[in-house]
Image: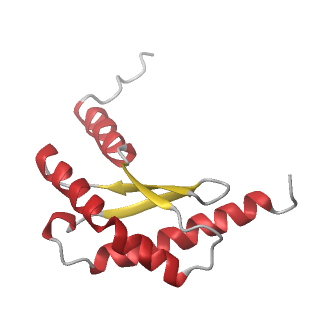
Amino acid sequence: MKRGGKERGRRIDGLLREVIGEQVARLNDPRVRGVTVVEVRASKDTAVADVFVQLRGSEAAQERALDGLEAARPVLQGAVNRELSLRNTPVLRFVHDESIDRASRIEQLLRDNPPAEPQP
């Protein structure tokens, strides 16, 4: 493996997250309001990038948000192409990041069911 390969990959992921996040915030599509880009993971050759997004609202609203992101894919990929000098412009794949939702559910369960006090 080349020296600094992982470091370069993380740097590219961060740059992609920044560019895509800024562009998503600028979209005029009401379906993508409230969408937050949480993380981006590009393949080593940058041919594909998984864009992890936090989605709000009902399941139907989340589906509409993903549809809106899919519709905006050419615009977002164009912005990546313009702003970053990568060998390949990655094909963006949008993935609902459910980790924050899971953490919230766990916190709620802990609040609703506090641990029992230790017995002496």
Which residue is at 45% across, 16% downward? 120
Asked whether 113 or 54 is in front, the reply is 54
**Is residue 76 positioned above or below 2 on the image?**
below
Q: Is residue 70 left or right of residue 65?
A: right
Residue reaching furthest to the bottom: 82
Residue 86 locus on image (x, y percent): 63, 73
Q: Is residue 116 left or right of residue 62?
A: right
**Is residue 29 positioned above or below 69 on the image?**
below
Asked whether 37 or 46 is in front, the reply is 46
Which residue is at 61% across, 53% downward? 43
Asked whether 103 or 93 is in front, the reply is 93
Residue 41 locus on image (x, y percent): 55, 55
Which residue is at 12% across, 47% downward? 60
Tell me which colouring the rendered structure shows: secondary structure
When asked about the image quadrant of residue 59, the answer is: top left
**Is residue 100 positioned above or below 25 on the image?**
above
**Number of marks in picture:** 0
Which residue is at 65% across, 70% downward? 87
Residue reaching furthest to the top: 119
Asked whether 40 or 105 is in front, the reply is 40
Q: Is residue 85 left or right of residue 67?
A: right
Residue 83 locus on image (x, y percent): 52, 83
Residue 93 locus on image (x, y percent): 41, 53
When asked about the image quadrant of residue 69, the answer is: bottom left
